[in-house]
Image (tube, rainbow, N blue to C red):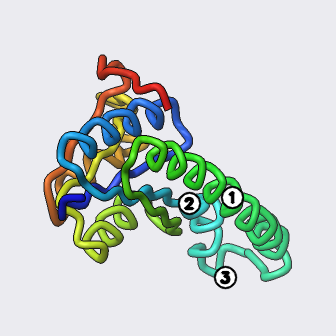
Amino acid sequence: MGGEKIFVALDNSETRQVAFNAALELAQLKRATLMLYHCISDDKLAESIVTMPVELGLSPELLAPTFEIISERTPKQLEQARTMLAQSCQAATRLGLRAEFDVGMGEAGECICQAAKAWKADTIVIGRRGRTGLAEALLGSVSNYVVHHAPCWVLVIPLTSEMHVLDV
């Protein structure tokens, strides 16, 4: 195997399989090792509630249900992410590629960039949902953040990509 390292950011959107297929093709061409990565994003609602000042009348008793929901949801999300990534690793291995996976927690763009840097990735492969205009301004774009903050090359795969679909 070559020394090139390809970091693949996989989410739960419809772009996941398109980005994964592109990463598999690239890894086969470069004889590269893959890191399959999923980031579990912080709960925006919980963040906004927690940062409200006490003067607004928020008591700790009101926050308890939010923290309970988060603490119950996180292990399930971790298990789902690990299962999805393990299956993807197996698919890469069947093609003769070396692959590993990891799960992070936090802001997706930041997590991806930090994890790719720590792994010393040569390239990041990430899908793009195609948000534009107001939707991108309001909701943000993980791929846009990664393009502007990544420590390495970034290959952004649009949802409409016509890459060859590999039989995995």
Amino acid carrying mark 3 in the image: Val
Mark 1 to mark 2 CA distance (whole Å): 7 Å
Disc 1 is placed on an element classified as helix
> In this orientation, which residue lies closer to the viewer: 5 or 48?
5
Residue 40: which disc? Answer: 2
Q: Circles 2 and 3: CB distance less than 8 Å?
A: no
- Report x, y in % for residue 71: 76, 72
Q: Which residue is mark 1?
A: 77
> In this orientation, which residue lies closer to the viewer: 45 or 16?
16
Mark 3 to mark 1 CA distance (whole Å): 31 Å
Amino acid carrying mark 1 in the image: Gln
Mark 2 to mark 3 CA distance (whole Å): 28 Å
> In this orientation, which residue lies closer to the viewer: 82 or 146?
82
Lower position in the chain sequence, tag 1 or tag 2: 2
- Report x, y in % for residue 63: 77, 74
Disc 3 is placed on an element classified as helix
Crowding near the residue tagged with mark 2, few <14, some 14–19, many ≥20 C-alpha atoms within 10 Å: some
87 displayed left or right of 111: right
- Report x, y in % for residue 110: 35, 65
Residue depicted at 38% across the width and 60% down the height: 35
Q: Which residue is mark 3?
A: 54
61 displayed left or right of 29: right
Residue 26 vertical position relative to residue 43 in the rendered view, above or below: above
